[in-house]
Image: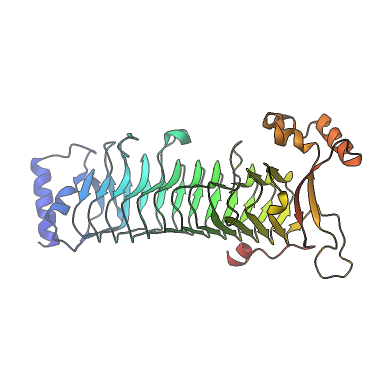
Amino acid sequence: MTRLTLLFFTLLFLAFFPALGVQGAIPLQPWFDTALPGAIIRLPPGTYQGPAVISKPLTLEGEGKVIIDAGGQGTVLTVKADNVTLRGLTLRGSGDSHDKIDGGLMAEGNNLLIENNVIEDVLFGISLHRTNDSVVRNNRIRSRGVDSADRGDGMRLWYSMHNRIEGNDIAHMRDITVSNSPRNRFIGNTVRDSRRGLNFLFSGRTLVEHNRFENNSTGIIALNSDGLIIRRNRITHAMDASGAGIALKEISAALVVGNEIVHCAHGIMADSSTNPIDRIVFINNLIAHNITGIYFYGVKGSHIAIGNTFRSNLWTVSIVGDGDPLNDVWQGNYWDTYEGFDRNHDGIGDLPHEVYAYADRIWIENPAAKFFRNSPVLELLDFLERLAPFSTPNLLLRDTEPRMTPLPSSITQSW
């Protein structure tokens, strides 16, 4: 059936069955129902009525001039087929049900291409359910002007693998939630003014690279997601009281390399594993202007920190837990609080850099006392402890080869 014939039947349908949703919107579902599998549908400019369902391989193109509006009912567009392409569309006006995951797009197919779309005034943005080997790129996604906890996820992956999420602009949403979805790639996205930039649950073996996370409660948080690679991201202004730039929990293997983590409540948070072969590795990250640069908790050990730059953090490192602090490896990091010399000019401090907990132990061991940090009394107590300790301070870390100058930031070179 030709495009002209399709348009004729659509206009005939409108003449006898006026649109029930958005005033003046053109019914969209007949275009899908009458198209042959593999067809390319280039919709004429205008506003079309959702919700609609694609149940066969199709290419749908809007060239930036097509709006699909669900009129506040359900999900604007649902894909239940493989090999579907959606390009240049504006999807808006979803329903408000969190239980039904009302949103802009619900995709349940493989080998999908979703690019250059605008998704706005929806509850959830894009949901991939059991979707594999697909590409979601260069989309603009926005929710509604409500509290962040009442919004839907900007993007949601559930039991979906081998997908590439690239170059998307996501803001004013709740989270990006990746659940039971290993082996995906998140590259070059911007996520801002939301709750959690990326929230991984049982979703390891995933690459997170070259993204920007700005003004979110937390940048990246991962639970039970082994094998993450987090590199060359910029994470800024995660200043929620319990927030962090990167938070890792119950993870036995992760590589965090070349990131800039600036102005967060905690730069990096991570617990520790009791398994001696487990390792979380931090290499060449800039950790600056945070309240706490790094916060490790649990049994001491299983962390390796090499070549990182610590600058202007209120507290550089806090480590809470039992065990030997020397089970963690610190080597070749730059510390702006290092007080040693480099007499042989090899770029490495002559003495190890050691961090001890003095009066810090009060709030490290009693979290409720954090409220009084920086108060005159605690500042005086900390000064007296360092001047003439009346109890043995706790060794938190020892960097055997502290650098006198920071390593060049790999993210600065690549952006």
Identify the residue at horizontal 14%, vertical 61% (top origin): 3
Q: Tell which residue pokes out farthest to the right in this image.
A: 388
How many dots with numbers? Answer: 0
Q: Position of residue 217 (x, y in %)?
A: 55, 41
**The N terminus, quarter of image:** bottom left
Asked whether 382 or 149 is in front, the reply is: 382
Asked whether 342 or 303 is in front, the reply is: 303
Identify the residue at horizontal 85%, vertical 63% (top origin): 350
- Would you say residue 121 is visible in this rendering? no
What color scheme is it? rainbow
Q: For this view, does 322 lie left or right of residue 42?
A: right
Asked whether 121 or 217 is in front, the reply is: 217
Identify the residue at horizontal 29%, vertical 61% (top origin): 111
**The C terminus, quarter of image:** bottom right
Q: Position of residue 310 (x, y in %)?
A: 72, 54
Q: For this view, does 118 lie left or right of residue 228?
A: left
Height in image: 90 above or below 151?
Answer: below
- Would you say residue 305 is visible in this rendering? yes
Q: Position of residue 159 (x, y in %)?
A: 35, 50
Q: For this view, does 310 lie left or right of residue 384?
A: left
Q: For this view, does 391 lie left or right of residue 49?
A: right
Identify the residue at horizontal 86%, vertical 33% (top origin): 380
Q: Position of residue 257 (x, y in %)?
A: 60, 60
